[in-house]
Image (tube, rainbow, N blue to C red):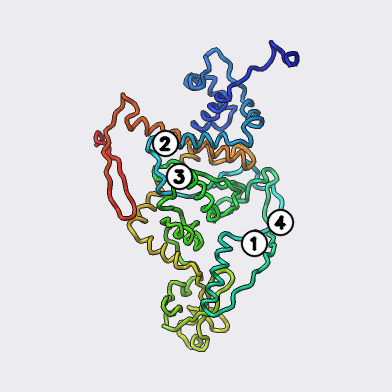
């Protein structure tokens, strides 16, 4: 094929390592585009030294990385390998502590106009997480209470209407409280108590946080041992997740959530559950007895309408025309009660206070200093590439700083004293510099 090539007018080859280093420079210093990165490399001697480009050598064109991504790096795990390699160096240095996982998600604004969309109907998933286990325990609970077990039910295909961006169809319409409604991606992330990112999963912005805790936990435990505790905010505080974590002997650390309901009406917490007799007692000391267990896994406890009709608390208790009060209790409610009990322990309080210094700081640095507030590309795979390289840069910076401070540099020695505070549930370790004040 020699005759097919021009010997004196062809484009010179570029080392793939150089391309990865160029992308790493872009994410380390939060440069918004590859075009701007090339401009910085042309004038910055330190960048040229890092890339091995002499002062009189020509810097590659900005489109080179994009073309090589399409031809070489797309549909490969090269960037995940880089992320894992940097993380493994942190493990070898003793900086990574995967015993406690701090989980949360942040949204990345998609590179799409929020006003350009079309309505689309999709099939709602009929099979939910833990559905098989829940159906089995529901039937067992019904048999225990003298009820007939449910026959297998055929799954019905339910449809719902969503907004799909015409610019980036893989993004999702992000709606959360009073925040701006737009097309975005959700980056579900887990980090350790030292701020090292251990794993991430990128989804469209309309995927709820609680659905991604289990796959993210499995992804992290695939590379590390099972954690001692998982710390997450109220979005993950569900009965299913509490049951799942306690079954795996993982300590769930969730915050306090205010009880929901109509203002001025009695909440479920105002009714006392008697575990021995399996019934509820209302504020007027009347009994709500078990009636049945429905397919959703809730036990139904109903009051006597003849007694409720003459009750002085009727207006605060129920608005039923039949003067009947019904309380739903999930068959896994014991797991949620255990979570509420653990919330008051000193270990859980200390771990949840640590959350704002770990996962929240990771998101703040990634968005403010490394440009992860907006998606630079379109599509789930390319946005995952952006998130992966951003967190690789964060881990690399922390690894370099900690290696420098912990005695790796012979010209900058610190003497550290490691203090261990023994706790029956968790080992707290602090590093105190003896040369500091």
- Residue 204 drawn at (x, y percent): 61, 48
Local packing at callout 2 (Cα closer than 10 Å; few below 14, some 14-19, many 20+) is many
Q: Earlier in the sequence, mark 3 or mark 1?
A: 1
Query: Which of pointers 2 and 4 indicates the residue nearer the eye?
Result: 2
Q: Nearer the viewer, residue 145 or 103?
A: 145
Question: How far, Cα to Cα, is label 4 from label 1?
Answer: 15 Å
Question: How far, Cα to Cα, is label 3 from label 1?
Answer: 33 Å
Question: Which residue corresponds to mark 2?
Answer: 90
The residue that appears at 33% across and 32% down in the rendered structure is 406
Q: Secondary structure at mark 2?
A: helix
Question: Which residue corresponds to mark 3?
Answer: 224
Q: Nearer the viewer, residue 376 or 195?
A: 195
Residue 92 placement, left or right of 171:
left
The answer to which quarter of the image holds residue 258 is bottom left
The residue that appears at 37% across and 32% down in the rendered structure is 403
Q: Quadrant of the C terminus?
A: top left
Q: Earlier in the sequence, mark 2 or mark 4?
A: 2
Asked if residue 253 can be seen in this view, the reply is no
Query: Which of pointers 3 and 1 indicates the residue nearer the eye?
Result: 3
Query: Which of pointers 2 and 3 indicates the residue nearer the eye?
Result: 3
Q: Secondary structure at mark 4?
A: strand
Asked if disc 3 and disc 1 are in contact, CB closer than 8 Å, the reply is no
Q: Earlier in the sequence, mark 2 or mark 3?
A: 2
Question: How far, Cα to Cα, is label 2 from label 4?
Answer: 46 Å
Question: Which residue corresponds to mark 4?
Answer: 121
Question: Which residue corresponds to mark 1?
Answer: 126
Q: Earlier in the sequence, mark 4 or mark 1?
A: 4
Residue 156 placement, left or right of 89:
right
Asked if disc 4 and disc 1 are in contact, CB closer than 8 Å, the reply is no
């Amino acid at each position: 094929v020699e005759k097919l090539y021009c010997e004196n007018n062809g484009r010179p080859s570029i080392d793939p390592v150089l391309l990865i280093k160029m992308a790493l420079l872009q994410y380390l210093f939060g440069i918004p585009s590859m075009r701007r990165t090339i401009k910085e490399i042309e004038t910055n001697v330190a960048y040229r030294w890092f890339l091995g480009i002499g002062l009189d050598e020509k810097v590659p064109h900005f489109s080179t990385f994009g073309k090589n991504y399409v031809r070489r790096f797309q549909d490969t795990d090269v960037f995940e390998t880089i992320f894992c390699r940097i993380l493994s160096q942190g493990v070898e240095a003793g900086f990574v502590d995967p015993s406690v996982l701090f989980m949360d998600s942040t949204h990345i604004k998609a590179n799409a106009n929020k006003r350009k969309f079309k309505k689309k109907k999709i099939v709602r998933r009929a099979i939910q997480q833990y559905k098989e286990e829940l159906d089995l325990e529901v039937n067992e609970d019904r048999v225990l209470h003298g009820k007939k077990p449910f026959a297998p039910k055929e799954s019905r295909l339910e449809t719902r209407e969503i907004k799909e961006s015409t610019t980036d169809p893989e993004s999702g319409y992000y709606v959360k409280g009073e925040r701006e409604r737009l097309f975005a991606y959700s980056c579900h992330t887990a980090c350790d108590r030292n701020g090292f990112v251990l794993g991430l999963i990128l989804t469209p912005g309309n995927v709820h946080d609680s659905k991604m805790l289990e796959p993210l936990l499995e992804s992290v435990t695939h590379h590390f041992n099972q954690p001692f505790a998982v710390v997450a905010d109220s979005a993950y505080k569900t009965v299913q997740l509490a049951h799942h974590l306690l079954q795996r002997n993982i300590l769930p650390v969730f915050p306090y959530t205010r009880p929901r309901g109509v203002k001025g009406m009695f909440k479920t917490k105002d009714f006392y559950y008697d575990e021995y007799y399996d019934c509820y007692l209302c504020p007027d000391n009347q009994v709500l007895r078990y009636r049945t267990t429905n397919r959703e896994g809730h036990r139904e406890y109903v009051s006597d309408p003849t007694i409720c009709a003459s009750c002085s608390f009727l207006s605060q208790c129920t608005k039923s025309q039949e003067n009947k009060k019904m309380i739903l209790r999930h068959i896994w409610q014991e797991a949620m009660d255990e979570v509420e009990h653990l919330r008051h322990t000193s270990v859980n309080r200390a771990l949840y206070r640590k959350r704002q210094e770990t996962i929240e700081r990771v998101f703040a640095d990634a968005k403010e200093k490394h440009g992860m507030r907006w998606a630079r590309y379109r599509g789930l795979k390319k946005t995952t590439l952006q998130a992966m390289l951003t967190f690789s840069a964060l881990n690399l910076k922390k690894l370099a700083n900690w290696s420098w401070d912990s005695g790796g540099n012979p010209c900058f020695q610190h003497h550290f004293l490691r203090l261990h505070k023994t706790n029956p549930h968790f080992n707290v370790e602090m590093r105190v510099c003896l040369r500091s004040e």
